[in-house]
Amino acid sequence: MRIVKFIIALLLIPVNIALTLGFIKNFSYFTEIQHGEVVFLSGFIAYLLLHFILYRPVFMHVMAHELTHAFWAALFGGKVKALNVSSEGGSVTMDKSNFFVVLAPYFFPFYTAIALLIYVIVDAKYVDFIVFLIGLTYSFHLALTLYSLKQKQTDLKEAGVMFSYMFIYLVNLLILAGIIALVSKQFNFLNFLNETWKLVEGLIK
């Protein structure tokens, strides 16, 4: 199984490069920064200022990390038997696991998912606040995911280190593109995929 994951990881390298270039290329179609983009960026930057200047909410990150393990285990039909969270770390005991469950906290932005659910149902007058919250929580996810990846993570070893990094990058990029497409009228997810495919076609030809 480790050999299979290693081969998949190697295949994901050019996929991630192509998607990254397609993602960047899509921004060349922006004409001017719009209101929704400003609100999202404000939230995104606000958390970064908090993270690097004032305070890292590690307990909230650990909580999200363990709840995400539990949530994804439940998605696959597993049962959570115990969950422990503290500012020093956390743990969750489940009766079912796979690489999605193991890696979920590194690619699934738990608090952003909640904000997105609220975005779908909230009254229009509160949309700006929720978009700000989406930016804030996704920045929280990215910053603290990068922070946690610097630590020794048994999750990555369990799933295979190289495969984990490639898979985490891939899903985070796709989710980020989806979020930007939601808050920006200038960013189209299908165009992003199309730009990526054009780059691949250019290389093949």
Image (cartoon, helix red, strand yellow):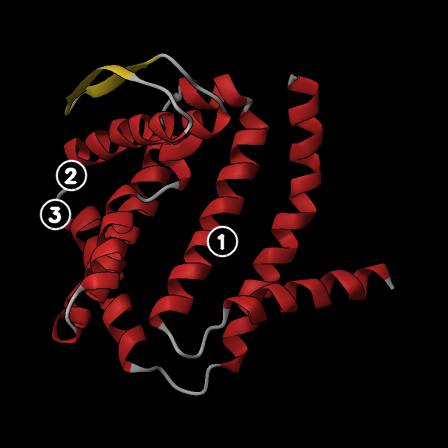
Farthest residue, direction front: 77
- Image coordinates of residue 161 in percent, x first then y, are 54, 25
Question: For the residues marked 1 and 3, what is the alpha-carbon distance in whole angstroms?
Answer: 30 Å
Res 13 quadrant in image: top right
What amino acid type is highlighted by mark number 1? Leu
Tell me the amino acid under the disc marked 2: Pro
State the mark number for residue 57.
Answer: 2
Query: For mark 1, what is the residue?
Result: 174
Q: Give x and y (percent) for residue 101.
A: 42, 27
Q: Earlier in the sequence, mark 1 or mark 3?
A: 3
Q: Is residue 185 above or below residue 111?
A: below
The local secondary structure at tag 3 comes to helix
Q: Are marks 1 and 2 in contact (CB under 8 Å)?
A: no
The numbered disc on residue 134 is none
In this rendering, position of residue 133 left or right of residue 145: left
| Marker disc for residue 54 | 3
